[in-house]
Image (tube, rainbow, N blue to C red):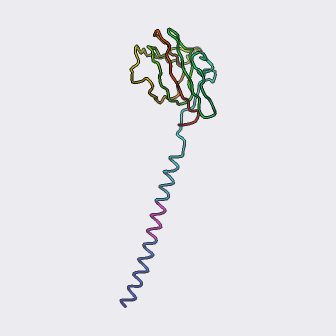
Amino acid sequence: MNTKSLIIGLLFGGLLSFGITKYITSSNSQIKNTDLEQQTTKPKTPKWTWADSLDAVKVAPNSHKIIFEDDKVRILKVLLEPNTIEPIHTHQFKSVMWFDKATPMSYYQYNLSQNGKYEITDSINIPQMPVEVLNHGESVDPEPPHAVKNTGTETGVAYRVEFKNNF
């Protein structure tokens, strides 16, 4: 009877171990698949509502020069002459931007009013850019209508890498 009990115990234990292992493996697989789905799902970005006609290159070609462009990325050199204000424009895509030569400036944010005209909603005066921002890339979200005025005596130089897809 000891041998019979031993064999039944081994069979029962084996089946129980097999069932538990199968359950754990299945649960881990579902967790990994969920993690993978979360990693590969594109983050939702707010719908862009501004007209393409406000694109920086179209509206402000004197200050926004295309250095390179393909279907994934656009690289701009942004030049702003002394005492000059750019036309109101937008940047639809997330980007990385850095200043090569920073000058004192004023940054103006705009919104479309009920009468169909763009009005300043906020402004920031930057009398002197910190040295730390020179040649140091910063991530920038898409920018709604804005304009920058160079309030200095030298030409400001910046670069902007716009990612047409998520980055």
Q: Quadrant of the N terminus?
A: bottom left
Image coordinates of residue 110 in percent, x first then y, are 52, 17
In the image, 7 versus 141, the foreground residue is 141
Query: Would you say 114 lies left or right of 137 here?
Result: right
Q: Give residue 18's position: percent from left, percent from top.
A: 46, 72
Vertically, is 69 above or below 53? Answer: below
For image coordinates 40% across by 15% down, the residue present is: 128
Magenta stretch: includes residue 82: no
Specify the segment rendered in magenta.
19-27
Which residue lies at the image location 63% right of the left edge and 24% below the top edge? Answer: 52
Total number of numbered discs in the rendering: 0
* Foreground of the two, 106 or 25: 106
On the rendered structure, is 82 left or right of 56? left
Which secondary structure type mostly characterizes the magenta part of the structure?
helix
Asked if 83 appears above or below 34 in the picture, the reply is above
Where residue 25 appears, as percent x and y from the top left, is 47, 63
Which residue is rendered at x = 46% and y = 70% of the image?
A: 19
Identify which residue is drawn at 57% across, 32% down: 47
- Choose top left, top right, bottom left or bottom right for residue 161: top right
Q: Position of residue 28 (x, y in %)?
A: 46, 59
